[in-house]
Image (spheres, grey):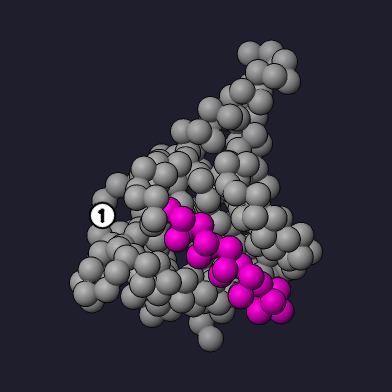
Amino acid sequence: MKIFDNDIKHVAIIMDGNRRWAKAHNLPAPAGHKKGVDSLRAITRACDDFGIKYLTVYAFSTENWKRKKEEVDFLMDLVAVTLKNELDDMHKEGVKISFIGDTSKLSDKLQEVILNAQEKTKNNEGVNLQIALNYGARDEITNAVKQIVSEGLKVEDITKDTISKHLYTSNIPDPDILIRTGGEKRISNYLLWQIAYSEIIVVDEFWPEFDKKYFERCLDEYARRQRRFGK
């Protein structure tokens, strides 16, 4: 088992290409989303194998509500069913599950499933899996500013750390790497504050075909880079 020794603590992923993978295989879009669950399971386990503590994945954005209702409903059901089916195994493997985004807009049923998963795994010490659901970075930053204002902080007391502490990810380090599958070269309103100095790696493979082998290649590429943090 390979352990990367280059201080990779946090990997963020834009899981793109489910629908395009399905189309390329003459399958309906839901088949791509289902296959994508297999990739998430594999990469979560790979993070554990490689000694990576934090994994944040983009599951559903604030803009994804614009998709066809049938697809949105399917995706929400898929999240609920996957959590129910995978929870015991993930718990046994020590995965700590949390969600970032405005989950208050989700159905009561899905919110209950989410809360159960978070509660059951909250004391686990393995991979910290953050699932971005109904997430948008601009909304996140806007909400952070609103919270800061409501607390009555003086302007001179507001720092970059103040904003970071009011984000959904306040309790975890910023991503070292942002991986986007599917070949598209854009950020898509994802972790805009947190990825300020992340290394960005875009791969052509669609998310359903992204496995441990491709993940390791991304980590190897990161290891060859020199992070500058704006210097």
First to last magenta residue range? 72-94
On screen, residue 105 above or below 83: above
Considering depth in this image, is 1 or 34 the residue closer to the camera?
34
Q: Work out which residue is located at the far bottom of the displayed protein and give it.
A: 1
Q: Which residue is mark 1?
A: 184
Q: Position of residue 213 (x, y in %)?
A: 38, 80
**Which residue is at 39% across, 55% downward?**
70
Using the rendered image of the protein, determine whether residue 217 is visible from the camera's viewpoint. Answer: no
Residue 92 on the magenta span? yes
Q: Position of residue 91 (x, y in %)?
A: 70, 74
**Which residue is at 58% across, 57% downward?**
130
Using the rendered image of the protein, determine whether residue 152 is visible from the camera's viewpoint. Answer: yes
**Which residue is at 65% across, 29% downward?**
162
Q: Position of residue 225 (x, y in %)?
A: 36, 60
On screen, residue 216 above or below 63: below
Where disc 1 sits, the SS reads: loop
On screen, residue 72 above or below 105: below
